[in-house]
Amino acid sequence: MHIDYVLSHEEALHTSWDKRLSPALHVEPGDVVRFECLNDSGPRITPETDAEELPEIEFIGHHLTGPVAIECAEPGDVLQIEILDIEHHDWGYTLIRSGKRGAGLLPEEFPDPFLYHWDLDDDVGYFEAGIEVPLAPFPGVVGVAPAQEGVHSTGPPRRVGGNMDIKHLTAGSTVYLPIAVEDALFSIGDGHAAQGDGEVCVSAIETPTTITVRFDVRTDLDIEYPQFETTGPFTPSGQDEPMYATTGIDNDLMEATKIAMLAMIDHLHEHYDLTREEAYVLCSVAADLKINEVVDEPNWVVSAYLARQLFPDK
């Protein structure tokens, strides 16, 4: 693969969105750039970090590589990003933050911080009880600078992308982002080796990544929010496969989601000898939340799906 530029986090690191940031690189449409990215917490969480240190670790923003200025990109145009290749490191972590911070789907159920370190092979993350999680790396953050003045947190996603955590933005995918400022000012990072749809404990398998993309500027498209093309994988194996699912039903979609996820955590705790913290971690990196229906008022249905093939007794 021909690569026009390599951009390292060592020369192009930032932890907030701000259209006033000076570009670390200027490229032309059609150029291929390899981004070397830290994990979302940067050097603040390493393989040596212990759970007892976590109360001192505050979220200061995703550690992103960029911004990159794309010549000829103007507000109203669309930036096309082809994700050509993603490489993950051999280590990752999943973090449950202290419940008092209100992060994740179930902070009231998990008051104490918890940190799990993963040993990552090329295609598998090794977990407790012989459980193996298939890996499908992707960037959690893919975005361009917002038009609003000032410094903005990388936490919430925006109409120009950012922290979308779409697990299907794997190698071979193409992302389309509406451009809000001149030269687009693109940044990327927050590498995930695996994640369930929902990322329920607010952390996937967080890992440093090397991500190679090709840029283009589309003046023939008109979109208000991000769009993408992808081939998945939509299940851990990439094929239709047996699942176990738990269901939540309530007149509030978020409450139905919590019911479904708590039931899955209970199932894993009771049947696979996982602690509740370990079960929550596994759900965040491998369980997929799906809205089954939103038309039979007053109650809506949400289910959590987990592939049987993850478990040694499959």
Image (cartoon, rainbow, N blue to C red):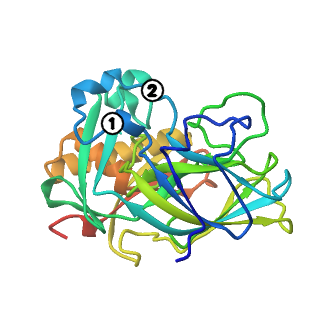
Q: Earlier in the sequence, mark 1 or mark 2?
A: 1
Q: Is residue 290 visible?
A: no
Identify the residue shown where x is 83% and y is 66%. Answer: 221
The spot of residue 277 in percent (x, y) is 25, 39
Instruction: Give the total number of marks visible in the rendering.
Output: 2
Residue under the point 14% across and 60% down: 130
Q: Locate residue 133 relative to residue 273 in the image: left or right.
A: right
Q: Name the amino acid, label 2.
A: Gly
Q: Position of residue 7 (x, y in %)?
A: 54, 54
Query: Mark 1 or 2, which is nearer the eye?
Result: 1
Asked whether, in this view, residue 70 is left or right of residue 222, the answer is left
Above or below for 115 versus 2: above
Residue that label 1 marks: 45
**Quadrant in the picture for the C terminus:** bottom left
Residue 115's tag is none
Q: Element at badge 2?
A: loop
Q: Badge 1: few (under 14), some or many (20 or more) residues near its Cα, within 10 Å?
A: some
Q: Quadrant of residue 104?
A: top left
309 or 205, nearer to the observer = 205
**Frontmost residue, 282 versus 38:** 38
Q: Is residue 152 visible?
A: yes
Q: Amino acid at mark 1?
A: Ile
Vertical comparison of 146 with 292: above or below: above
Whether label 1 touches label 2, CB < 8 Å: no
Residue drawn at x 44%, y 42% is 40
Residue 178: image x %, image y %? 77, 54
Dot 1: what SS? loop
Residue 186 in the image: state x and y as whole percent.
Answer: 66, 51
**Does 234 sit above or below residue 62?**
below
For the residue pair 259 and 16, the one nearer the viewer reads as: 16
**Number of residues whose C-alpha sits closer than 10 Å to that of mark 2, classed few (under 14), some (14–19) or many (20 or more):** few
* Mark number, residue 102: 2
